[in-house]
Amino acid sequence: MNGEIRYYRGLHRVKVVTESVGYWTVEALEDFEDYVDDKRTFVKMGEQRIVPPSLVFKEKTLPPMVKEHAYELEMEKKLKRMVAKEEQAESKKKSAK
């Protein structure tokens, strides 16, 4: 695995230098901007960083979208059902007249 080209956060080319149990050391192969602990940092080519393996991908892709909170999704479905029920009631009233 050492020396393998990967993509940090699915966007930036890095080379895996070392692997340990919970973190990998990667070397940047291009300059990029990163956010660490809500602080903006600039990473220069050749700079090494310690990152969790979950942020390093084999292919250049965006990470999966973060799913909305389950409660919000449930309430949205409930609202859609309520609106549909009201629309049905209104259409029945119009057709009865």
Image (cartoon, rainbow, N blue to C red):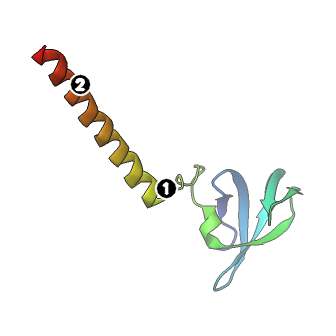
The C terminus appears in which quarter of the rendering? top left
Real-space Cα distance between discs 1 and 2?
34 Å
Percent from the top left, x then y, of residue 43?
86, 57
Q: Amino acid at mark 1?
A: Lys
Looking at the rendered structure, the secondary structure element under dot 2 is helix
State which quadrant residue 37 falls in.
bottom right
Q: Which mark is residue 92?
A: none
Residue found 63% across the figure and 86% down from its top: 21
On the image, the x and y values in percent for residue 14 come to 73, 60
Amino acid type indicated by mark 2: Glu
- Asked whether 31 or 97 is in front, the reply is 97
Q: Earlier in the sequence, mark 1 or mark 2?
A: 1
Left or right of residue 93, residue 30 in this image:
right
* Residue 67: mark: 1
Quarter occupied by the N terminus:
bottom right
- Check if mark 1's residue and mark 2's residue have beta carbons within 8 Å: no
Where is residue 39, by image quadrant?
bottom right
Residue 75: x, y in percent? 40, 51
Give the residue furthest to the bottom.
21
Q: How many marks?
A: 2
Pick whichever, 36 or 10, lies toward us: 36
Instruction: Report helix, strand or loop for mark 1.
Output: loop
Dot 2 crowding, Cα within 10 Å, few <14, some 14–19, many 20+: few
Q: Position of residue 10 (x, y in %)?
A: 63, 54
Q: Vertically, is 28 above or below 94? A: below
2 to 78, vertically: above or below: below
How many residues crowd around disc 1 within 10 Å: few (fewer than 14), some, or many (20 or more)? Answer: few
Q: Identify the residue at the far top of this view.
A: 97
Identify the residue at image location x=13%, y=16%.
Answer: 95
Front position in the image: 46 or 89: 89
Image position of 21 with respect to 44: above or below: below
Question: Where residue 90 is drawn, which disc sits there?
Answer: 2
